[in-house]
Each structure stands twice: as C-alpha cells, then as structure tokens.
Amino acid sequence: MKWLMFIIIISASVYSGELSLASAQRFLIQNNFDLQMAQEEISKSSIEIKSAKSSLYPSIDFSGSFNYLSEKSKVKTTIPNLVTLVSEPGQHDRTEFGADIAYPLFTGMTRMNAIKSKQVVYDNNQYNKIIIKNRYSFILGITYLRWSLAVEQMAVRENNVNLMKNYVSQMTALQKGGIVVDTKVLEADAKLKAAELEFILAKDLADSLKTEILGMAGIKDSNVIPQKSFTFIDSVKIPDSIQINRNEIRLLDNRMHLLDLSSRILNSQRYPLLAAVAGYRYANPGLNQGMDEFMDYFIVGAQLKWNIFDGFKNRNERAALEKQKNITSLDKEKLIDSWQRSLRLWNNQVSSADEKIKAAEISKAAYDAYVVSIENSLKAGVVTNLDFETAVSNLTLANLQVEQAKFNKRIAVLNAIYVSGQDINFIDN
C-alpha cells in the first residue's frame, strides 16, 4: 500500500497538459495531508474500539514477590499450669509466585458505555473526513473557476496588446506620411503600454491561481491549463433547503450522544464495583506452624469497591457535561440558522446571475451582428482594418462578459451546494 501511495504521488508530480476539475479533485483526495491524517484518525479509533471491548474479557496476571521481615514467624505453645513455649521455626524472607484471573461481575454498565463511546468517536472521524474532503473540494472548485476565468481574461488582454501594436504601426505610418501629428503616435503608444500592463496583471493573476491549484492538488508540473468543463456545477439541481442529515449535523448530534455516554459512565461510578478473583500461589507463607517450607495453594474470592464520598466531584462533572450538551445544542441551532440564511442569499445570487447571463448573451449577439456588418464594410472599402480589428476586439470582450456572468453563476451554485451540505464530487461527472 505504501508503494502504491508512492507511485500515485510520483505520477501526480509529472502531470501536464489540460487539467480538468475532476482530475484536480482526484489528485487533491490522493495527496491532501489533512485527509491522510483524517484516515489515520479513523484507523486509530477502530483500534480503540477493540481496546475498549477487551474489558469484556477476564484478565490474567502473573506475579512474583520477595520480602524480608525483621521478625521470624513465632509459634507460642502454652501448657496449662506448667509452662509457655515460644519457638521461631520460620525465616526472615517471604517469596511468592502466582497467577490470578479476575473478571468484573458488575461495573454499572461502565464497560458497555465506554465501548459505545469509542464507536461514536469512530463514526465522528468518518464524518469529519467527509467534511474535510468537501471543504477542500469547495475551495478547489472556487479557485479553479477563478483560474479558468483568469486564463480567459489573459487571452483577451493579449489580443488587445496585439491590436494596440497594429494601431501603433498604423499611426506611425500615418505620421510619417504627414497625415497625423506626433501626439497621435504618442497616444497610441500610451494605449499599448496600458494594454501591456493589463496583460501582465492578468497573467500574474492566472499564474498565481494556477500555483494555488497545483499546490492543492499536489502537482509540481507547471505546464497545465484549465479544461472548460463544469458538468457537475452546470447540471446539479440547485438546493432550496439544507440537508438535514448533512455530516456536520451528524457530527454535532454524535457529540451530544458522546456527552450523554460520558454522563452515563460518571453515573455508573456511583455504584459498587464487584469482581471475582481466583489464583494460584507457590510460596513460603508460613501457613504450616510458621514453617518456612514452600507450598502451592489456590485462592478464590470476590472484591467489592464502592466510593461513598468524593467531595461531590462526580456530581459536578455530570452537571458540567449537561451544560456542554446545551452549548452543543445551541451551536447546532446557530449553524443551521447560518446555513439557511446563506443558502437563501446564494439562491438569490443564482437567480440574479441568470438574468445577467441573458443580458450578456444579448450584448454578444449584437456585437456578432456588428462584426458581420463591419466585415462587409471592410470588403467594400468603407472602413479600415483597424476598425474591423476594434470590432472583433469588442466582440471578444462581449464573449468575456458572457463568461464572467457564467462564472458568477457557477460561483453562486457552488456556494449554494456547499452551504446546503450536499456532497461535492466533481470526479463522477
């Protein structure tokens, strides 16, 4: 498995070409450190469940001890009306080897509640991994959309630079022919410099966003471009309410359940603990008239432990857990209210974006007709090449406005999906 992970990471580092949003998410899931740590937490909590279940089995212990006593064992024998005899048949040392098996007969359901608590922690770690995956996928999606738009803007700015270069050339030729004054050339050159600056800024933004994408996806190759495919975002049904069973709510509900189980464990500590014990010994206990001889013997018994007073510690801890449950419940209500308000906001943004897309497409259609008309005028010799190139440039800007409007809608849709609690999965689309 480690070799497989190594191969996946290496393959990601040499990725180049057209990078789709689905591919970027796939690399993100493979290489994200927080997701890897979340998976380790799941594995750890699975082991902790097994550890908690071990309390249902009896425990077996081996022991050994050696003690030196300042006094020997004494045997006192009294003969009525005659004499009292005292002998010391034992030795100063006591050596013991043994094995014990113990099993708790009653723990006040502490063990079962502890096992349930570990299962709840395991479930929470599962939910948390999905939450982390959706959060990073959301950030990836937003950044990818910005990167795609920035690349479009960079192309438009580059086209504008080329147009301005042609404009400078034409003004220079006209100036040499004495048709225009020097200021026209200077004006054209200033516009070119401004266009070049806009291109540099657009390129810097695109490169910066690309670097963010590559960092999130774990890709080191810089020769990548965005793929203009947003199937998941464009085809998803816009949610009108939050998901009641979303993982964040499950996580909060489980936290409340975990607090309840912790309260039950504390409550069970108010009851006595009873355990059965059986053991085998090989020792020189001095049982035979105080003699120091070694013997083997068995012991069977029961142990009872009951805390009668702890300074109200248990009661105060249970009261604190109840307060924490109230805090968690209020936190849940606060988050639900926040999600609902945010969802209404983003749904309004989606509706507004639809209207802007329609307006941008109408504007683009008008520029399409204008370019066709001015192209015919160019063929008739009525306008210049510069007029035609300017019209084409305006059409390119109109196309960019359409893309900008679509970008705004996709941003709103992705926010609505994330706020509603739906799973963000670009890979399957």
Image (cartoon, helix red, strand yellow):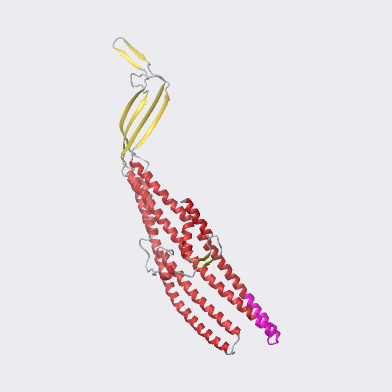
Residue 213 against residue 256 in the figure, above or below = below
Number of numbered markers: 0
Pick the quarter of the image with the C terminus: bottom left
The quadrant holding residue 83 is: top left
Residue 225 left/right relative to 237: right
Q: Is residue 350 visible?
A: yes
What is the x, y in percent for residue 110? 33, 44
Residue 77 against residue 189 in the figure, above or below = above
Q: Is residue 274 magenta?
A: no
Give 209 or 249, whichever is nearer the viewer.
209
Dominant SS type (magenta): helix
Residue visible at 34% across and 29% down in the picture = 280
Q: Which residues are magenta?
A: 168-194
What is the x, y in percent for residue 92? 42, 20
Residue visible at 47% across and 63% down in the picture = 23
Residue 311 left/right relative to 393: left
Residue 38 left/right relative to 264: right
What is the x, y in percent for residue 143? 50, 65
Give 54 or 390, whichever is nearer the viewer.
390
The quadrant holding residue 342 is: bottom left
Q: Is residue 174 magenta?
A: yes
Residue visible at 36% across and 42% down in the picture = 54
